[in-house]
Amino acid sequence: MRHSKSLTTVALLALLGTTFSAYAYDADWKRGRLYYRSVCTACHTTSPIGAISPSTKTKADWSAYLLTDRHAKGKDAVSKYVGKAYRDSIKDSNKTAAKFADTPDKELMEDIKAFLLKGAKDGDAPASCN
């Protein structure tokens, strides 16, 4: 009887472990597109660099850019502009930042990455920012 309970417990723990380890955030490229176009592009339109569309880089370029987390020629972190503190600072003038005020930073970054990779020069649907 004791052996039976132990096997049941082990099986239950294995099942729970599989359930939790199988959970991964499934990035939403559409949400990433909305944020990128409403927040990132809004700033880049006014800066000397101009608009930067996803199709200006390859998937490898975007992945490397996001991995290094360097923005503005290394002066800032990309994650700064996706972070809650930044969204809070612009939410009065940017409806999208207000809409995503409570979105976890990691999820929003994954959403943006999904959009950039999908819209990259060699992505599934090369995108421009209109």
Image (cartoon, grey):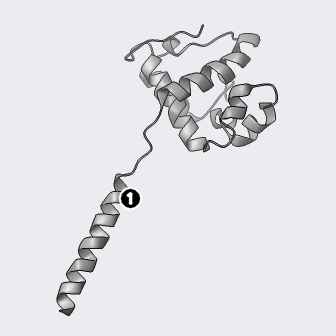
Q: Where 55 sits versus 68, above or below?
A: above
- In the rendered image, residue 119, in percent from the top left (x then y), is placed at 46, 17
Query: Residue 126, how many percent across, how many down?
Result: 44, 12
Above or below, 127 against 35 in this view is above
Res 15 → quadrant: bottom left
Q: Closer to the camera, 86 or 47?
A: 86
All told, the count of numbered labels is 1
**Is 53 situated left or right of 85 in this image?**
left
Q: In this view, does 17 lie above or below 129?
A: below
Residue 74 is drawn in which quadrant? Answer: top right
Q: Quadrant of residue 41?
A: top right
Instruction: Give the residue at x 38% y 59%.
Output: 20
Image quarter (top left, top right, bottom left or bottom right) of the C terminus: top right
- Residue situated in front as seen by the camera: 81 or 36: 36
Specify the amino acid type for callout 1. Phe
Residue 125 in percent (x, y) is at 41, 14
Q: Which residue appears at 23% of the width and 85% of the height?
A: 5
Decide if residue 1 is in sight here.
yes
How busy is the neighbourhood of tag 1: few (under 14 within 10 Å), some, or many (20 plus)? Answer: few
For residue 67, say whether it is visible.
Answer: no
Figure check: 6 above or below 30:
below
In the picture of the structure, the residue carrying the numbered disc 1 is 20
Work out which quarter of the rendered image holds the N terminus and state it: bottom left
Image spot of residue 115 (x, y percent): 49, 24
At x 63%, y 31%, the residue is 70
Instruction: Please tell me which residue is depicted at 57% across the width and 36% down the height of the picture.
Output: 108
Tell me the element at label 1.
Answer: helix
